[in-house]
Image: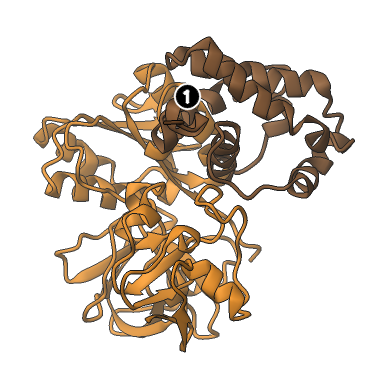
Chain colours: A orange, B brown
Amino acid sequence: MTKIQFENQSYSVKSGESVLDCLIREGVAVEYGCKSGGCQSCKMEVVSGVPTEQSQSGLDDSEKAQNYFLPCICMPEQDMEVARPGADAVNKLETEVLALTMLNHEVLRIRLQRPDNYDYFPGQFLNLYNPDGIGRAYSIASQAEESFLELHIRHVPNGKVSGWANTQLKAGDQVSISQAAGDCFYTPGNPEQPLLMIGTGTGLAPLFGILRDALRHNHRGEIHLYHGSSVIEGLYMVEEMRVMADEVENFFYYPCVGQDSVPKGIFSGRENQKALADRGDLSGWRVYLCGHEEMVTSTKEKTFLAGASLNDIYSDPFISVAA
Amino acid sequence: MSNSLFDRLGGDNAVNAAVDLFYRKVLTDERINHFFQGIDMDRQAAKQKAFLTMAFGGPNSYTGEDMRRGHAHLVARGLNDNHFDAVVENLGSTLSELGISDDLISEVAAICETTRDDVLCR
């Protein structure tokens, strides 16, 4: 008989029974809806074992890459250990601060020693905890082969974590972080697809991670990155991005500022409006949206209406937490 | 040999092909798009897929009670027959664009019709 492990308990799956039905029969509190693979509200993660092909058929590539599956349509063929999605993100790890660098007047780049066996996709986020145990999510800008984890932290007025990181943290300190989570990252398999990246503020951090990950996978389609800020002082890494755009044939970079008068090489106007106007029909494009929540939400709808398939739109809205 | 409507439409592939087209039509239809403003698009797309699967005669476990519970807040905001008709019309033109025959579209519309009273909470 097939067994499933869930939250330190083992359950026997009856013949012809789905993983979800088994958990429900055993009285486990799990979320579910249509029980037929449609609504995806019961989505879970396979920790060990292999999900059936059918149980991943309606999921997008980033969900499959994280071993997500739909327990309602999974009749397991072998023993599996399953978990709620992102369940291991709560496990804290200790690591060392390697270096701190200001990228502009308010954005701190922090590099942390990457713990052994720390798996992530560039563009995912992790929680960084202050000494009081209060955590905030930051996107990961570093690359899989790098020995450090890079985060870009904007100093929020009275921010419990960003304030501490900006004023008290120093190289050599030990800090706590969570495992990486999130589904806004690069997935290989369609190297000719054009990519549109739109970010505001430290939304550049995940986009920088995703961009370099795409290039590392020899992505050949055009990659257009629009980075915006309301004021010019809010942009950062402008020179570094320009150098990359000069060196990499299929990469294009557009720094945008919501001011009328801007220096040469900077575009005046909102990054999302410029991107939509420049690119026009987005049929066949893959879209990455990171940063300000309202920008991400509204641009998601606009890029979808411009022709991008919903499965090809990846987004990471930065939800601000009351300080 | 009798093939179900779901199979004749193309099964899951038909649902996947239709969902983007259908959702785009709904979001740009001034008659009904105000019901869809400000909601999470990924969750909504998953619901649309479940709806399309049901409307295509595919596997689902929706009950009339589910339909009522899922739409009661919209009925409170004025959801009526005209809006229901607009959704069915958008579904029909979606299928038409995908090259589905009028006969099959009528069968899909007939399935939608069976949910009308539950959706409108009557």
Q: Which of A262 and A65 is in front in this view?
A: A65
Residue A217 at x, y percent in the picture: 13, 47
Q: Would residue A152 appear left or right of A144 to someone viewing this image?
A: right
Identify whether A266 is placed above or below B92: below
Identify whether B82 is placed above or below A52: above
Q: Residue at x 54, y 39 (%)?
A: B45
Q: Residue at x 22, y 78 (%)?
A: A117
Residue A216 at x, y percent in the picture: 13, 49
Q: Would residue A32 appear left or right of B11 to someone viewing this image?
A: right
Q: Nearer the viewer, residue B66 or A31?
A: B66
How many numbered marks are there? 1
Q: Quadrant of the N terminus of chain A?
A: bottom left
Residue A95 at x, y percent in the picture: 31, 83
Q: Residue at x 42, y 76 (%)?
A: A88
Residue A258 visible in this rendered orientation of the protein: no
In which image quadrant can residue B73 be found? top right
Q: Please give the chain letter of the residue carrying mark 1.
A: A
Task: Describe the element under mark 1 as helix, strand or loop.
Answer: helix
Q: How crowded is mark 1: few (under 14 residues within 10 Å), some or many (20 or more)?
A: few
Identify whether A286 is placed above or below A3: above
Residue type indicated by callout 1: Gln
Q: In which quarter of the image is the C terminus of chain A?
A: bottom right
In which image quadrant can residue A181 be found? bottom left
* Residue found at the very far front of the displayed protein: B1
Q: Name the residue under label 1.
A: A273
Q: Would residue A228 appear left or right of B87 to someone viewing this image?
A: left
